[in-house]
Image (cartoon, grey):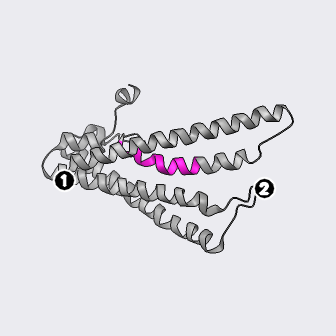
């Protein structure tokens, strides 16, 4: 059951990663077009603003993918000297703290979006972008990341309760330097 949940989340996150990659690619095309146009005395204008928005959105959405691919940086000098249960304790602690922190970020992101929605806030830039257009997907990305963290933690707890330390390590452990390089 827990593996099915993780496989489904991993599949969704891979699709999200593809979409965020395409969004980044589109942003690069727009910035490059602006650079070329500047050589001819013209400009699209606002590319710095748009690229900032894109980075905020794809970062919040990309974090869930990174979590399930064990891509988050963790200092594991003590964990590396443990085996089985010791590693599991460090992994559970790490993921619990991460899930709690990301949940706090998601919760604190809501008032930012709510204020923009209530006030009809716009960016103080020439584009006057409605901030809710940017903050809605940004907020949703943080909520998605928090959901990923809690579901991954629950799946790992179930695996550990079954005594499946190797499977749990593959889900919430860390990649060694040699694994990360390949």
Element type at mark 2: loop
Which residue is depicted at the point 60% across and 70% down?
Answer: 117
Does residue 63 appear in the picture of this structure? yes
User: Could you say where residue 166 lies in the image, as x and y percent from the top left?
Assistant: 19, 39
Which residue is depicted at the point 72% across and 35% down?
Answer: 33
Q: For this rendering, which residue is in front, 45 or 141?
A: 45
Magenta segment range? 55-68
Q: Earlier in the sequence, mark 2 or mark 1?
A: 2
Is residue 82 found left or right of 13 in the rendered image?
left
Which numbered disc, 2 or 1, marks the residue closer to the eye? 2
Q: Is residue 38 magenta?
A: no
Element type at mark 1: helix
Image-quadrant location for residue 96: bottom left
For marks 2 and 1, give the CA distance: 52 Å
Image-quadrant location for residue 72: top left
Q: Which residue is mark 1?
A: 158
Label number found at residue 73: none
Q: Which residue is mark 2?
A: 126
Q: For this rendering, which residue is in front, 147 or 178?
A: 147
User: Could you say where residue 161 lies in the image, as x and y percent from the top left?
Assistant: 15, 53
Which residue is depicted at the point 41% across and 44% down?
Answer: 65
Q: For this rendering, which residue is in front, 177 or 40?
A: 40
Secondary structure, magenta segment, majority class: helix
Q: Residues within 10 Å of mark 2 (few under 14, many from 20)?
A: few
The residue sitting at the bottom extreme is 118
Q: Quadrant of the C terminus?
A: top left
User: Could you say where residue 47 lies in the image, as x and y percent from the top left?
Assistant: 71, 45
Is residue 69 found left or right of 106 in the rendered image?
left
């Amino acid at each position: 059951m827990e593996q099915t949940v993780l496989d489904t989340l991993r599949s969704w996150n891979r699709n999200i990663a593809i979409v965020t990659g395409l969004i980044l690619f589109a942003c690069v095309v727009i910035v490059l077009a602006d650079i070329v146009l500047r050589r001819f005395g013209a400009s699209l204008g606002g590319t710095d603003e748009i690229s900032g928005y894109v980075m905020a959105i794809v970062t919040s959405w990309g974090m869930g993918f990174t979590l399930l691919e064990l891509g988050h940086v963790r200092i594991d000098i003590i964990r590396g000297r443990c085996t089985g249960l010791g590693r599991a304790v460090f992994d559970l602690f790490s993921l619990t703290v991460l899930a709690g922190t990301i949940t706090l970020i998601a919760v604190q992101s809501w008032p930012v979006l709510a204020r923009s929605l209530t006030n009809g806030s716009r960016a103080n830039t020439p584009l006057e972008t409605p901030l809710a257009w940017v903050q809605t997907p940004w907020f949703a990305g943080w909520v998605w990341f928090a959901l990923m963290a809690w579901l991954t933690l629950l799946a790992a707890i179930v695996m550990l309760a079954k005594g499946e330390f190797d499977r749990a390590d593959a889900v919430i452990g860390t990649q060694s330097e040699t694994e990360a390089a390949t």
